[in-house]
Amino acid sequence: MKVTGIVLAAGVGKRMNSAFPKVLHKILGRPMISYPVDALKAVHPERIVIVAGKWMDEIKKALKDDAITYAIQKKPMGTADALLKAKRYLGDLDGTILLCNADTPLITHYTLKKFLNHHRVKRNTLSFISFNTDSPSQYGRVIRDESGRVCGIVEDKDATKRQKEINEVNSGIYAMEAEALSCIKKIQPSLVSGEYYLTDMVEIIYRENGKVGTYPIKDSIEAQGINTRADLSRAIDMMRARIISKWMDEGVTFIDAGRVFVEPAVLIGRDTIIYPNVYLEGNTAIGQGCTIYPNVRIIDSSIGDDAVIKDSTLIEESRIEGSSSIGPFAHIRPRSIIGRGAKIGNFVEVKKSTIGSGSKAMHLSYLGDASIGDGVNIGAGAITCNYDGRMKHKTVIEDMVFIGSDSQLVAPVRVGKGAYIAAGSTITRDVPAGSLAISRAEQRHIEKWALRKKTEHRKQKTENKKQKTKNR
Ligand code: UD1
Ligand code: CA
């Protein structure tokens, strides 16, 4: 049976008090609208139409999905008008329409599938997902006739005092047969807001003896609409909890499950332990048996099995191989590869560099545009000088090299296999394999310098005193 998915996203979202549209506000790194769109996709509709307004281009850019069709509603005149715009765009529709508001991101595809099935089994002309809530004020209330049949939806703005007391509300998710669309034209604008309400279809179909029904869901979280920043914050927390709970089922330990943020596309291996205040973002994949200590943020990176990421570390677009140790306070910048068993320690910044397996840079280093072999030791404070003010240059450090503390490697430069760089050296030329490079001033001693300095100081003091008495 043919299904067309429609997402309404042309509203202004005034209650968000924002310079950009509500549906592009992010929930765990992804725009709000992408959630209902993905849930719809999982139902395999023939096509998905998004009704967008002034921000259509921004929405297109955010979703990057050529399979989606867009219909424009230039002026947001209400949800019924938005649906009418989609209809115009689609021409003669047949089959079932599954319609979601774009601001209902917590809905799951499981529920959508069950809902669609329910709609078909009941042979309704129109069905909608409803739920009960103790705080119904931002939802349309479900009105029932004496026999308990649904006969309308009344918006909060338009509701009487008695209707406001109703706890059964509309989620903004509908399934309707294409023929139901013919009644949109009969919808009159609300006397209170001037908007054309899609929800008025319920009353019209009821009056015309069509079959209208609700699909009540128990988990009202799924149907939460986002209208304000407070709603958004709650939705982020709910989505967060949902993802964390899934990873707990998959065998991941969270020391404080309430304070870890894992974006939807992230993967985490079994027996990995995650401490509080960790952010795992984008297309990050964490291996098995890893430990991620507090305040770590990992973006679009892969972490091999048994790696340890110590406190307050930032890793971006990089690959960290298994059994390595990164941090505390390390910054791994894009396009870096940290080899197996390597150690990157305190206050070390790595940029666009490859570090071989078992190599170590434990303290206060900058390694940029470097290719570093296996078993290399980078001493404390050693840095690559990769930038000449105009261009970036490469540093090559071959296997088993020892770089003494506080050395500078002025790129382009190559340090041959097994070579040693003496501490405090500034290396400007290639170092042959197996040699020691030393480029610092030789140490000399000035005998009795300290004693002389002391005597001079004393003399000066007596002189100053004399001057003072004279001036008095
Ligand atoms: C709507 C429903 C309400 C339901 C609630 C569930 C109507 C009239 N009311 O109310 O019964 O309980 O959702 O969350 O439908 N939009 C457009 N064009 C417009 C107006 C809105 O595309 O002209 C889009 C918005 O971008 C949004 C969705 O429709 O994604 C819902 O609009 P919103 O203004 O948030 O409706 P609610 O007042 O929440
Ligand atoms: Ca809403």
Image: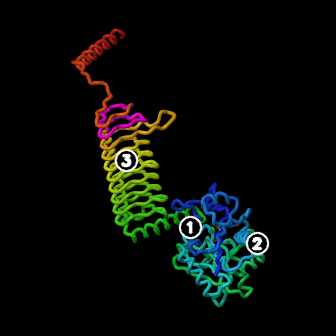
Badge 1 vs badge 3, beta-carbon distance below 8 Å:
no
Residue corresponding to mark 2: 189
Q: Is residue 366 left or right of residue 139?
A: left
Ligand 1 within 8 Å of disc 3? The answer is: no
Specify the amino acid type for callout 3.
Ile
Q: Is residue 416 magenta?
A: yes
Residue lying at 55% horizontally and 81% vertically, measured from the top left: 114
- The mark found on residue 355 in the picture is 3
* Neighbour tally class for label 1: few under 14, some 14-19, many 20 plus, Cα within 10 Å: many
Kindly identify the residue that appears in the image at 59 percent across and 63 percent down.
Answer: 228
Residue that numbered label 1 is attached to: 35
Q: Quadrant of ligand 2?
A: bottom right
Q: Quadrant of residue 379?
A: top left
- Picture coordinates of residue 389, whole percent (x, y): 50, 33
Q: Which contiguous range is marked in magenta?
A: 403-428
Q: Quadrant of the N terminus?
A: bottom right
